[in-house]
Image: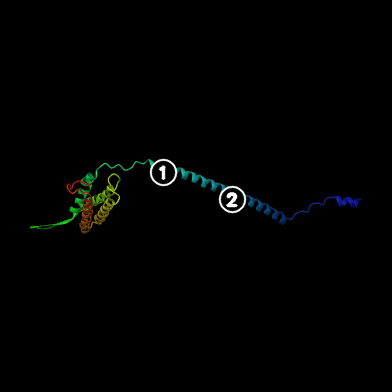
Amino acid sequence: MLREQIRRQPAKPRARTADEMTKQRRQKRQVGSREDSHSWRSAFAIAIAALVLLGACQGGEQNGLAGGAAASLPPFKPVASVHQLMHDVVYPNAEIVWESVGTIITYEGTEEIYPRNDQEWEAVERSALTLTEAGNLLMIEGRAKDTGDWMERARALIDAASVALEAARNKDAAAVFDSGEGIYYACEGCHERYRYDDDPSTMR
C-alpha cells in the first residue's frame, strides 16, 4: 500500500541549471523577434500600398486639372496683320542687321562700318533675335496663308536670322555681313510667292 502511494505521488520538477534557463530565455526572444519582424513587414507593406494608391489618385487629379487648364487656354489671337508685321517688325530690324556692317568707299577714302562697342553689338543682337521670332509670328494661325510653302519660308527666315544672331553674340563683323545675304533671300523667297504683282506692298 505504501509502495502504491509512493508511485502515485507526482515527481517533483527537477531543478534547472543556469545554462538551461539562459537557453529558454533566448528561445523566447527569438520567437518574439520573429513575430515582431512579421508584424513590421506586414505594416510596411500596407503603408507602401496606401502611398501608391494615394499617389495614383493625386496623379489622376493633377492630370485632370492640367487637361482642363490646357483645354481652357485661349487660342492665339493675332493683332497685327501680316503687312503690319512686315512693315513694323521684320523690315526695320532687317535694316539694322544689314546696315551694321559694311564698307563705304568715297574720294576721301574707305570707311569700314561695324559695331564699335558693346551697346552697338547688343543692338544688332536684339534685331537679329527679333527677326528669328518674327518667323514664328508668321506661322501663327490667323496669319499663315497655308501649311506648306508659307511655313517653309517662315522657317527660312528663322534659320537665316539665327545665323546673324550667333554672329552678333560672337561680335563677328564678317559673319554678320555674310548673314545679311541669307536674310535677304529668305525675305525675297516669300515675297515672290505671296505678293501681288500689281501691288508689291500687299501680301496675298
Picture coordinates of residue 82 (x, y %)?
Answer: 24, 45
Residue at 39% in and 42% down = 71
Residue 90 is tagged as none
Picture coordinates of residue 110 (x, y %)?
Answer: 12, 58
Residue 41 is tagged as 2
Mark 2 residue crowding within 10 angstroms, few (<14) / some (14–19) / many (20+): few
Contact between marks 1 and 2 (CB within 8 A): the answer is no
Q: Amino acid at mark 2?
A: Arg
Residue 162 figure quarter: bottom left
Judging from the image, what secondary structure is the residue with disc 1 in?
A: helix
Q: Which residue is situated farthest in the left direction here? A: 107
Residue at 89% in and 51% down = 4
Query: How far is disc 1 from disc 2 in space, using C-alphas?
Result: 39 Å
Q: Please tell me which residue lies in front, 65 or 37.
A: 65
Q: Please tell me which residue lies in front, 82 or 41.
A: 82
Q: Please tell me which residue lies in front, 148 or 181.
A: 148
Query: In the rendered view, how is the structure colored?
Result: rainbow
Q: In the displayed structure, does residue 193 sit left or right of residue 51?
A: left
Q: Which residue in the structure is indicated by mark 1?
A: 67
Q: Earlier in the sequence, mark 1 or mark 2?
A: 2
Q: In the displayed structure, does residue 138 sit left or right of residue 116?
A: right
Q: Amino acid at mark 1?
A: Gly
Q: Which residue is situated farthest in the right direction here? A: 1
Picture coordinates of residue 114 (x, y %)?
Answer: 18, 55
Q: Is residue 119 visible?
A: no
Judging from the image, what secondary structure is the residue with disc 2 in?
A: helix
Picture coordinates of residue 22 (x, y %)?
Answer: 69, 55
